[in-house]
Image: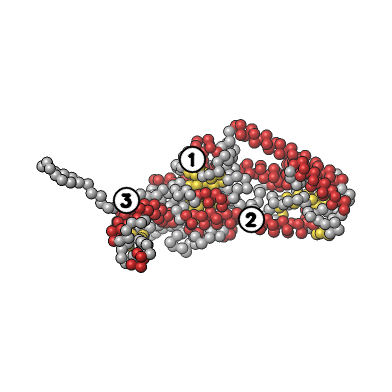
Amino acid sequence: MTSLAPGVYVREVSSGVRSIVGAGTSTPAFIGFTPQTVISAPTLVRSWTDFSKKFLPTDADIKESLTRASAAYQEALQAVKILEKLISDAPDAASKVIVTQAKIGETHTAAATFVASVVTALANLGLPRWQDVDTALEAALKVTHSEEKAADIIFTVYSTAKTHYATAVAPTVTGLTATATAAATAADALSSAAVTAVQGFKGNFDKITGAVVSKFGLVDASRIAAAYARREQSAKDKWNLAEAVLGYFANGGSQCYIVPLEDGGILGKALALLETQQDVSMVVVPDLHNKAEVADVSAVVNHCAKMKNRVAILHTPRYSTDQEALAFRNSLNAGANPAFGSLYFPWVTVPGVDGVPRSVPPVGHVAGVWAATDSSRGVFKAPANVSLAGASGLDVALSDEQQGVLNDKGVNCLRSFPGRPLMVWGARTLAHSSDRDWKYLSVRRLVCFLSDSIQQATSWAVFEPNDERLWATLRQSVSAFLRDQWRRGALQGSTPDEAFLVVCDKTNNTDDLVNLGEVHCDVFIAPVRPAEFVHFTIQQTAGQAP
């Protein structure tokens, strides 16, 4: 600048330090079934009202749904009548058995062989168990049923005036499998029955299959009833996500992503969609509470570990004892990075989005507690010793002794203390209790926050000249950011030198690395850890100073 007139001139010069802005930590993604699925991509919602408009059914939707359900129910009953008539008309129906794909003249050990084959098939598919399918079958088919067999099969005994027969119901079984036997009062009576498929019954088997397929597009009455039962149960389960979102906003949440799953939706596809949402910091799957879904739990935790900037909030199935919760925890395989997952127990009682009180997984409420704690204190504060809003009770009341065992295994408990509201009373990850680095949620989430913040704010350095000026700028930017975090209380130490160290110079950027186009910036931090166990010692001094 050339100065012509006398006076004072001021020139602004950039300091060369690029500031790092902290990444967000309070945005969860909810994956699950919505009462009204109209969107398949991750959708951002900023309030309960926003969620209601996008995902809750209107009065017209409810009326249409009830009409469809009624029609499905009538079809199921009609299919049962067809099935009963064809079987009752079959020759020797009281003493013969028809087995799927049975060849004329073959002898089979009916129940034992069939149950074993279906159990194996379902186990290989890893399908979830449909709760209460037997109860729904009773209502739809107006019959009594035997006890459950294995995890995914309902063996139902039907009784008519002429015969007794049983049907094994499983979501993936194709073809009719009806077992007719004389004087059978329970499915167990079929376990040792050696039977023969004969010409007359084989013909009626073809009639049954053809009649029902041509009329309903399904194979047999049991499958129609099972599908109906699954629809009914699915409709119940679809409130889990809505209750979780309501609990999230009730506990201080501000915004979240919703990833709806259609019936039979694949969790892996939903997780893949979330890989494009860089601002997600928690993953919540309220419908993931079945003992058969352990592999899905691992998938959620592994997704978080892959992304490195989020942690999974998980829950146990709806158990009534601490021992069941402990057994479930021990059955989990959280993968190579268990610190990216957290587990909560027990379920909570809520008033119900639709006005019907119910017990639901606590994960949505917990996500709200995480978000509110981040906002009021910081991500370094353990999200525990915080009251839980939007819930009226717990499914299980725990003692200190019971929680101690669960806490050591990384199960975060919700507690009810006299004179206090419901409390979140645990803040550990699924990492082993001996893992000093990653057993605390606050440490895991703090490191996620620091890593994500630095990564997002230093992208400018790519393709810059790889020399001392670049190293110094990176060193100064990261140091300034960490110094601010230390002042906020996220790092230990009475001075910044005790709290962190940033190395980015010739010592870790050798000529060989520079020639490879690499820049290395090593960051060492001393994160604060929660005071999980507070001890006081009281001693009598007999009136004298200690």
Q: Residue furthest left?
A: 6
4 up-or-down from 122: above or below: above
Indicate the secondary structure of the residue bearing disc 1.
Answer: strand
Q: Label 1, label 2: how many angstroms apart (C-alpha)?
A: 32 Å
Residue ID for mark 1: 45
Indicate the secondary structure of the residue bearing disc 3.
Answer: loop
Marks 1 and 3: which is nearer the front?
3
Q: Is residue 77 left or right of residue 124?
A: right
- Dot 1 alpha-carbon crowd within 10 angstroms: few under 14, some 14 to 19, many 20 or more: some
The residue at the point 58 percent across, 40 percent down is 37
Could one spot residue 422 in this view of the protein? Answer: no
Indicate the secondary structure of the residue bearing disc 2.
Answer: loop
Marks 3 and 2: which is nearer the front?
3
Q: Label 3, label 2: how many angstroms apart (C-alpha)?
A: 49 Å
Which mark is on residue 126? 2
The residue at the point 79 percent across, 55 percent down is 101
Amino acid tagged 1: Val
